[in-house]
Amino acid sequence: MKHLVLVTAVFCCAHPASRAEENTQAVGAVVAAASDVTDLPRRLQSEAIAQDRAEFGYWGTDPAKYTGWKSHSNRLIPVYAFGTKNAGDGVDLNSYFGPSSVYRSEAKVQALYGYVPEKTVNPDAVWMDQTNVADLQRAAAAAGKKYVFLVVFDGMDWQTTRAAAVWNQKKVTYTEGRGTGTHFQEYDANGTTQFGFFVTSAHNEGTDVDVNTQTVKNPGGTIRGGYDASCAGTAPWATPGDPGYLIAKPADGNPKHDYTDSSSSATSMTAGIKTFNGSVNVDSNGTPVSTVAHDLQRQGWRVGAVSSVPISHATPAAAYAHNVSRDDYQDLTRDMLGLPSIQHPQTPLPGLDVVIGGGYGNNGDAKRGNASQGDNFVEGNIYLTDEDLKTVSIANGGKYVTAVRTAGRKGTQILDEAAAAAAKDNHRLLGFFGNGQYNGHLPFATADRRYDPAPGLGGKSETYSAADLEENPTLAEMTTAAITVLGRDKKPFWLMVESGDVDWANHDDNIDNSIGAVNTGDDAVKVITDWVESHSNWDESLLIVTADHGHMLNLVKPELLISK
């Protein structure tokens, strides 16, 4: 048996002149802070926030307002597959794309959603569904692949990728299709790469749950999923017929379909089902389901998850954990580490072999927004309790070599040492890093890679100390450590890598952070492709690079990102 690798991301209303006049002073202050003319994305972002409009583009449905929408959308999402072309039925991307689209068949759409969404069956559909990402991984393993990598750029739609590609190339090179400008766009995997796109809509939005009993109160929720191409477009780069449809605000006469959150979409890619927003690897009724990682682990594979954001945020949690609520972070982490949890109190899951991510220093209590974790919430770190960290450590009889952010020590060195020790002695690896003052994520590398974020919504920007940068590894370095442990011998393995800061940047309507996040995620992809070339080949490896959902960045004049 062989290893699989999968890598996995509104128009506004008129802006009154009086608002611009009121912001004159703010513009001056912000532009002064972004005075480095070589850092154009930062300057553009600073000006756009101060003026709430920009010539290069906008977020939302109103071209006159830069910060018009700060959440997800129902856009089609690109998928870049490596090791798939001519690899056989179920592995070749054309098993799901083009004439093979599930959306051409009413019976298949019914089976997918459990109902037939309005205006979703389309005889001309070429788009895949997000659940096909899980189908592809399972088929590849069954066909004999040994290494599977899933890289998820959280929140990275086609427009976000294009912004980074324009900045990287310092020119506009494409208006549709796969494009060029990043490693994952240009790498051909010895002629085995393919490109497609898929629907991300969830089963439903508005399902209420009881986290203490792990039950669903109202199966089916309040808004159902679906995809109407006449409203949303037939390709990721297409101009939508009804932009409001993409954010569940359709024009009169058009259907209202939900847009997914990260937990539902990640569940689709790891478990192969449609489920409700806010859930992790449970079906629409709240019943736990098996993921690709669970299936492969039972067959003897090693499995791991890496993220630039907290270790049990929606996407990395969906690699392995079960919960009716994505906000029950401590229990999600327990599932990932093989500890008793609210879902598995008596017989814990075996646990992942590698877990590396953020969350360090992010403490809270039940009175400060953590009541959503239920009655068993333990005050302190909201993702990983002190007691759980002690329990899993090999120093206390646990299974994990632990690497935790430590004052005065280089994060990369701590992680590398732990990975080497785990690989040498056949242990598991837990890496726990991040910036507590910013919800536990790694520092944002901006477009110029200087870690100097421009202001986002509310005119706020993050600032990092020398210690923040020194004591945290990068996503690429985390990926290297994970592969060191998982790939220490010829045993097959599965690895999810999440570039989660793309989503955080796009929620912040921040083009500077967004470009930087795409590129740091691309660095992690390069780590994987280099490893395959030096330790394996594309006959026995699978890599999928994709996103879980889109946002609403609209590039009007992309050339302005490189010349103003």
Image (cartoon, rainbow, N blue to C red):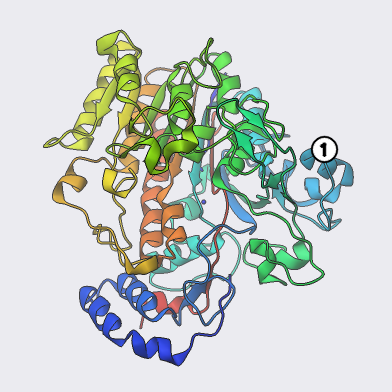
- Residue at (26%, 79%) from the top-left corner? 31
Query: Between residues 122 and 113, which one lies in front from this camera angle?
Result: 113
| Relative to 82, residue 401 above or below | above
Circle 1 SS class: helix
Which residue appears at 27% of the width and 10% of the height?
396
- Count the numbered circles shown: 1
Quarter of the image with the N terminus in it: top right
The amino acid type found where label 1 is placed reads Ala
Task: Give the residue furthest to the left.
Answer: 408
Q: Which residue is mark 1?
A: 111
Front-most of residues 390 and 308 = 390
Position of the C terminus, as image quadrant, is: bottom left
| Res 20 → quadrant | bottom left
Using a 10 Å C-alpha cutoff, classify the residue at mark 1 as few (fewer than 14 neighbours), some (14 to 19) or many (20 or more).
few
The spot of residue 117 in percent (x, y) is 81, 51
**In the visual, does 199 lie left or right of 491?**
right
Residue at figure coordinates x 64%, y 52% from the top left? 196
Q: Residue 47's image quarter?
A: bottom left
Q: Is residue 530 visible?
A: no
Question: In the figure, is residue 246 to the left or right of 383?
Answer: right
Q: Is residue 535 above or below residue 115?
A: above
Q: Of residues 267 and 542, which is closer to you in this image?
A: 267
Q: Is residue 172 left or right of residue 299?
A: left
Which residue sits at x=34%, y=45%?
A: 441
Which residue lies most toward the top here?
A: 397
Q: Position of residue 143 (x, y in %)?
A: 65, 25
